[in-house]
Amino acid sequence: MEYRMERLAGLKVIGFERSFPVESAYDMIPKFWAEFREEYLELLMMGASPVDEQTQAVKDYHIGQMGISIDDIGGNGRFRYMIAGEYTGGPVPEDMTVVEFPEMDWVKFRCIGPMPQALQKLNTEIFTEWLPNNDTYELAMGANIEWYSDGEIDSEHYFSEIWLPVKEKK
């Protein structure tokens, strides 16, 4: 696995959020993305002007550049997932959420391949191999970020990343 360490001075994100059960997330999250692409991205990619505050926020904050898993809803086999972008301030449209991550270290894993298969495969490898066998780092919080580049997501050469907040083991 190819990765690098990076300290982020804090990160605010904005986006659409849903709760998912862990056992069906690999099936349900791609459906969430398909709904998002159909409702917002396809119109914007065709050059349409935003028609409401949600579509304007998608355009302004590049919502869709990140998929964020946050495990803070009290166990019960569920977690929050956001289709998000970097929040730079301003009005927060109805049905959107803002989340702030404090300054911390992140390990960023490089992913090459079509979505969602390549990312799901890497995610499984990170949590079943890299993290359990890592003698230096552990998770700093129950969250991870999928970062998406521009380009054709079905391409064998598509580039994305998985970011995990980490801290040194004591």
Image (cartoon, helix red, strand yellow):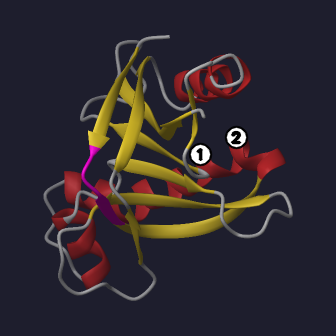
**Which residue is identified by label 1?**
30
- Which mark, by number, is residue 89? none
The residue that mark 2 highlights is: 26
**Image check: 75 left or right of 122?**
right
Q: Residue at x 61, y 68 (%)?
A: 18
In front: 57, or 153? Answer: 57
Query: Residue 12 lies in magenta, yes or no?
Result: yes
Foreground mark, 2 or 1?
2
Under circle 1, the secondary element is: helix
Residue 51: percent from left, percent from top: 22, 80
Which secondary structure dominates the residues rendered in magenta? strand
Q: Are marks 2 and 1 in contact (CB under 8 Å)?
A: yes
Q: Residue at x 46, y 83 (%)?
A: 95
Q: Position of residue 122 (x, y in %)?
A: 57, 22
Q: Is residue 58 left or right of residue 119?
A: left
Mark 2 nearby-residue class (10 Å; few <14, some 14–19, many ≥20): some
Task: Quarter of the image for the C terminus: give it.
Answer: top right
- Left/right of residue 39 with respect to residue 140 in the rendered view: left
- In the rendered structure, which amino acid carries the disc numbered 2? Tyr
Which residue is depicted at the point 70% across and 40% down?
A: 26
Amino acid type at mark 1: Pro
Front position in the image: 77 or 42? 77
Give the vertical position of 121 relative to 16 (above or below). Answer: above
* Front residue of 88 and 46: 88
The magenta segment: 8-13
Q: Residue at x 61, y 52 (%)?
A: 142
